[in-house]
Every structure is written in structure tokens, then in C-alpha cells.
């Protein structure tokens, strides 16, 4: 039963028990393994609906449940966000073309625990700017994760991400954030990908949350299309995102969503 163990901070952030790390690792590993397995499907000519169908089948193979099908009316096993789509792209009939970049975001439920992760993929040969965007975004996520330890603040995470991105002349999306995760999909806090050092709640052992920065080559502003899901950059510049779920330990953090195949970066084979 939810709420019978652990404690909530004043900010409503759940402090999980040490025993809760193992089931979070299992859920995160399933989500990451599904991204590993779908990688060969990402090539020119394949539709995003076909990739989503492959993901739905993989979720079943793992005996897991999709967290996104039925979530607030969403009907798909993944979000697939192409080129200038920032996040929440809806899988459909669009076929991938050479040089497209895409984020695939999968959230599964395993034994009641949520695994939420996303990565960038490329169809065919990406352009140099696209590769740089993807590399900067991944590095920003990893710098955010490096700031995670008890006593640090959520503002420290956002600051680490923002300073890296802006030093490269790119921008951090403000309209979407990471979130607490555990036996619920979206819990407090909002994990901002920008901020001032020392601002926001202080991190404590047992907090579980995602960090999922969205980075644009151009300006940070977004808008939602008429389908009420697809978020795009207002200036049509290309956007990238990586997402990991982490748990705060006594000394730092553990990443729940590491790729079992070591395949989380498209330019690292
Ligand atoms: N996985 C997304 C996240 O990182 C949420 C997707 S909700 C959906 O929080 F309904 F759009 F799938
Ligand atoms: Co998330
Ligand atoms: Co996600």
C-alpha cells in the first residue's frame, strides 16, 4: 500500500526506504532495455507508429505495463519527438528521413514501480549541428546528475545543466521539468533544468526523481500543437532531450535507468 512506508518532506517529497532502490532499479532497467532493443528499428523509412508498436510489444515481453497508455488520455506506449519537437511527440504515420533526430521516451510500471527514461536516436547520418546538440544535451544531463547528493539543492542541479548548455550557445527549455517518481508517475518536486545554486528544496537520501533536460539550438520558448500533446520550439529550431531516473544515496546517487547494453548515446555506437 502506498504511503505506509517512508516519509514526506515539508515540500511533499517522498523519502524512500533503502529497500525501495531494488524495485526502482528493476523498473528503470526494463525501460532502458526497451530503448536498447528498439535502436535497430530507428532508420530511414520506418514510421514513428511502427517504432511505438515495437515498444508496446517489448513492454509485453518484459511483463511490464505501459505508464503512458491511458495517462491523461494519451494512447501510446512512447513519446517520439522529432527534430523541432521538444517533447510529447505522438507516434504516427511520419516516416523517418535521413538525418532526422528523435527522442524516444518510455515509461513502464514493473511491480507497481515506475521506470521513466528517454534518449536521442538518429536516422541515417546526422548533421554536425545535430550531433553537437545531442552531445551537449547528454553532457548537461550527466552534469545535473553529478550534482545529486544529500545536502545539495535542486537549484544546484538546474544550475549545472543551464550553465553548460548556455556556454555552448544553446538554450534550456523552461516549460517542462523533471519530477519525483516511485510508485507514482509524476510526484513532487518539479525538477527544473535551470536555476541558481542553493535555491529550491534540499536533497535528502531516499528521494527518487527524474532529470530530463530539453535543449534547443535556438530560443527556449515552446508551444503546444492542436493535438494538445506535441510541444514544439516556437522558432522551429531543433531540440534534444535525455532522461534518467535517479535515487539519492548517502554519498551521491544511483541511476536507475542506465542502459544494460551501454547504449545511451547515438554517437557512441
Ligand atoms: N515520460 C514523460 C516524462 O518524462 C511523460 C509522458 S506522458 C505522456 O515525464 F502521456 F505524454 F506519455
Ligand atoms: Co519523466
Ligand atoms: Co519520460
Image: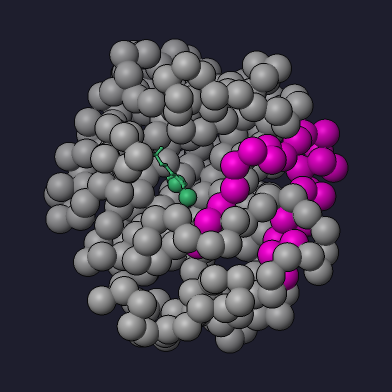
Left/right of residue 131 with respect to residue 54 in the rendered view: right
Q: Nearer the viewer, residue 21 or 199?
A: 199
Q: Is residue 19 above or below residue 198?
A: below
In the image, what residue occupies the spot 62% across and 56% down?
Answer: 191
Residue 162 percent across, percent down from the top left: 77, 48
Magenta stretch bounds: 153-180
Q: Is residue 248 above or below residue 18?
A: above
The colour scheme applied to this rendered structure is one colour
Q: Dividing the picture into quarters, in which one does residue 75 lie?
A: top left
Q: Is residue 57 magenta?
A: no
In the image, what residue occupies the spot 34% across and 66% down?
Answer: 183
Q: Is residue 164 magenta?
A: yes
In the image, what residue occupies the spot 56% across and 52% down?
Answer: 178
Q: Dividing the picture into quarters, in which one does residue 50 lie?
A: top left
Left/right of residue 87 with respect to residue 171 in the rendered view: left
Residue 76 percent across, percent down from the top left: 29, 33
Please identify the quadrant where the N terminus is shown: bottom left
Q: Nearer the viewer, residue 230 or 92?
A: 230
The quadrant of the picture showing ligand 1 is top left
Left/right of residue 146 with respect to residue 68 in the rendered view: right
Residue 6 percent across, percent down from the top left: 42, 84
Q: Is residue 111 above or below residue 46?
A: below
Can you see residue 22?
yes
Left/right of residue 183 with respect to residue 86 in the rendered view: left
Q: Nearer the viewer, residue 179 or 40?
A: 179
Amino acid at each position: 500500500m502506498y504511503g505506509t512506508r517512508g516519509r514526506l518532506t515539508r515540500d511533499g517529497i517522498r523519502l524512500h526506504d533503502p529497500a525501495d532502490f531494488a524495485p526502482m532499479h528493476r523498473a528503470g532497467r526494463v525501460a532502458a532495455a526497451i530503448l536498447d532493443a528498439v535502436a535497430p528499428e530507428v532508420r530511414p523509412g520506418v514510421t514513428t507508429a511502427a517504432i511505438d508498436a515495437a515498444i508496446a510489444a517489448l513492454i509485453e515481453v518484459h511483463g511490464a505495463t505501459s505508464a503512458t497508455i491511458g495517462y491523461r488520455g494519451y494512447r501510446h506506449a512512447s513519446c517520439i519527438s522529432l527534430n523541432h519537437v521538444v517533447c510529447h511527440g505522438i507516434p504516427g504515420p511520419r516516416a523517418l528521413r535521413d538525418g532526422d533526430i528523435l527522442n524516444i521516451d518510455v515509461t513502464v510500471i514493473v511491480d507497481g514501480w515506475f521506470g521513466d527514461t528517454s534518449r536521442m536516436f538518429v536516422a541515417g547520418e546526422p548533421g554536425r549541428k545535430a550531433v553537437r546538440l545531442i552531445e551537449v544535451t547528454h553532457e548537461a544531463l550527466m552534469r545535473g546528475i553529478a550534482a545529486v547528493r544529500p545536502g545539495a539543492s535542486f537549484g544546484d542541479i538546474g544550475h549545472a545543466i543551464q550553465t553548460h548548455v548556455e556556454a555552448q550557445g544553446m538554450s534550456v527549455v523552461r516549460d517542462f521539468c523533471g519530477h519525483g517518481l516511485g510508485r507514482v508517475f509524476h510526484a513532487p518536486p518539479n525538477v527544473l533544468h535551470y536555476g541558481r545554486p542553493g535555491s529550491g528544496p534540499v536533497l535528502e537520501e531516499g528521494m527518487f526523481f527524474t532529470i530530463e533536460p530539453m535543449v534547443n539550438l535556438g530560443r527556449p520558448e515552446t508551444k503546444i500543437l492542436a493535438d494538445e500533446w506535441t510541444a514544439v520550439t516556437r522558432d522551429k529550431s531543433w531540440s534534444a532531450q535525455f532522461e534518467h531516473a535517479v535515487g539519492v544515496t548517502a554519498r551521491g546517487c544511483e541511476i536507475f535507468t542506465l542502459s544494460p547494453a551501454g547504449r545511451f548515446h547515438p554517437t557512441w555506437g
